[in-house]
Image (tube, grey):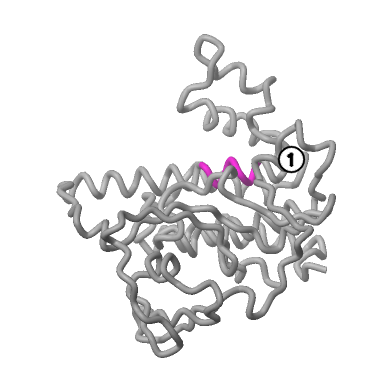
Amino acid sequence: MDPESTDLGKPGLVTKFQHSPDDLLPEPVGIDSEIKDLCSALETSDPNTSCLGYLCSPDKKCHEFRSIKDNQTVSESSQLISLDQLLSHSTKARYELTRKQRYRLAVILAASLLQLQTTPWLTKNMNKKDIFLECHGREVITERPYICHLFSSIKHLSASPSTTPPEDITTTTRFAAKASLNQLGILLLELCFGRAIEDQSHIREEFLFNGKPHNQTDILTAREWISDVEFEAGLEFRNAIKSCFDFDVKPNWNDIKFTQSIHAGVVQPLKQILHNSGWADGS
């Protein structure tokens, strides 16, 4: 399996829905039905329905939306565990990801951020508390991570039009892109070492205020922690993480030059590391 082609949250996405009662208008679903509002379709669907209908992409292609149970059996003995729990020092006694698993997961998350950042599936930062992996006993399945995300119906959203001035939207967009890349950089650091950033007390203590973390503590800790990456994982891994904090192009997910620079500076080097290690095939 090619990690870059693995879409985080597809299929079997763990989701939560937020609707008002007036939003839920039952509509017929089936293979011949176009899905206008995916959240409402999922909320009102029959659990035994194999196909909810189809989604239309901007290029006019139609994609069937089928239940996961049509093509995959979920084991009753399996459970989900968050990446936050897996990286926590308190959980390591029971679960521990191998270096190969961590590096492959790093590629999946980096590629998925580029694929999903401008979609409703990922509207904010990629948070380790919202990323889940399936586990059977002590075995953790890292090839297909899930993301938990709260959706609102488009009918509900359309009732609250944005009044933000265009110049403020541009500033917010750049800030959001920078924040999401910084968060990815932190995730890559944690996967590189197999440890949570909150557990790096020897670095973190320098960036606390009155003994407590503030909104820049993780970023400052990460920038200091990067200096240890080359010894742990090599220069390429270090440079990939640095590309999540230092940009040659102004951060903007809607700018193709920016997304191409992140793909070239983050995703491609991580994939090359997998290839050089003989871990690209997933076996």
Main SS category, magenta section: helix
Q: Is residue 186 magenta?
A: yes
Which quarter of the image is occupied by the N terminus?
A: bottom right
Q: Is residue 75 magenta?
A: no
| Left or right: 224 in relation to 162 | right
Judge whether 59 appears above or below 255 on screen: below
Judge whether 152 appears above or below 214 on screen: below
**Residue at mark 1:** 193
Judge whether 152 appears above or below 198 on screen: below
Which quarter of the image is occupied by the C terminus?
A: bottom right
- Residue at x-position 69% and y-position 75%: 72
Toward the viewer: 88 or 108? 88
- Residue at x-position 70% and y-position 47%: 235
Toward the viewer: 103 or 271? 103
Q: Give the amino acid type for the residue marked by disc 1 in the picture.
A: Phe
Q: Residues within 10 Å of mark 1 (few under 14, many from 20)?
A: some
What is the x, y in percent for residue 98? 82, 50
Toward the viewer: 129 or 77? 77
- Residue at x-position 54% and y-position 16%: 212
| Mark 1: secondary structure | helix
